[in-house]
Amino acid sequence: MDKIKKKELRKFYLRKRNSLTNRKKSNSKINLKILNFFKNMKHKTISGYCSVNGEVDPSLSLNTLSESGHSICLPIVVDKNKKLIFKYWNKKTPMEMGKFGILVPKSEEVKTPNYLLIPTLSFDMSKNRLGYGGGYYDRTLEYLKNKTNCFAIGLAFDEQLSQKLPTEKFDQKLDLIITQSMIVK
């Protein structure tokens, strides 16, 4: 039942996200909140992502964080049913097309992030996240939380808020969610 409901919710929130009219302004506000979150931290390894399908675009904050001494990495889908790997990135890193039409770094340097900026299709106030359904971030978060002290930050627009998302045993909660008007702790 939850799988069917999640599939319908994915379609609904993808359409909703793609129809946003104030995207540029909202995206700028979210990037400022990301920078504010990291302002008193030094030399962290932060995973971002290259946005697709109308996702929040964290590129402004990733560039700024990189220039201020943080190590930035981007996720790469290696294989179905596997966790993501992360490769070093800065604005000069050559990129190539990866799986699902997502740009990935050509870098050979694999990193383990302390912080992950994660795109969402939808979220709820309990910090549940609805993604695209591949389970890549769920597997990755489960692995990283057992191995390191990682912190997962979901990025979304206010319009992606759901009253309550259906969850399954393998779904990983986020530690924080940033939107243009709120931070869900």
Image: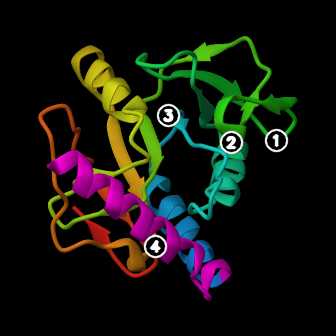
Label number found at residue 91: 1
Q: Which residues are magenta?
A: 1-24
Q: Nearer the viewer, mark 1 or mark 3?
A: 1
Name the residue type under label 3. Lys
**Crowd rating for badge 2 (residues with CA inside 10 Å; few <14, some 14–19, many 20+):** some
The residue lying toward the viewer, choosing from 14 and 174, is 14
Label number found at residue 132: none
Label number found at residue 66: 2
151 shown above or below 79:
below
Could you tell me which secondary element the residue under label 2 belongs to?
A: helix
Rendering quarter of residue 102: top right
Q: Earlier in the sequence, mark 4 or mark 1?
A: 1
Name the residue type under label 2. Ser
**What percent of the width, then of the height, locates residue 173?**
21, 45
**What percent of the width, then of the height, locates residue 9?**
33, 63
Q: Mark 4 — residue? A: 157
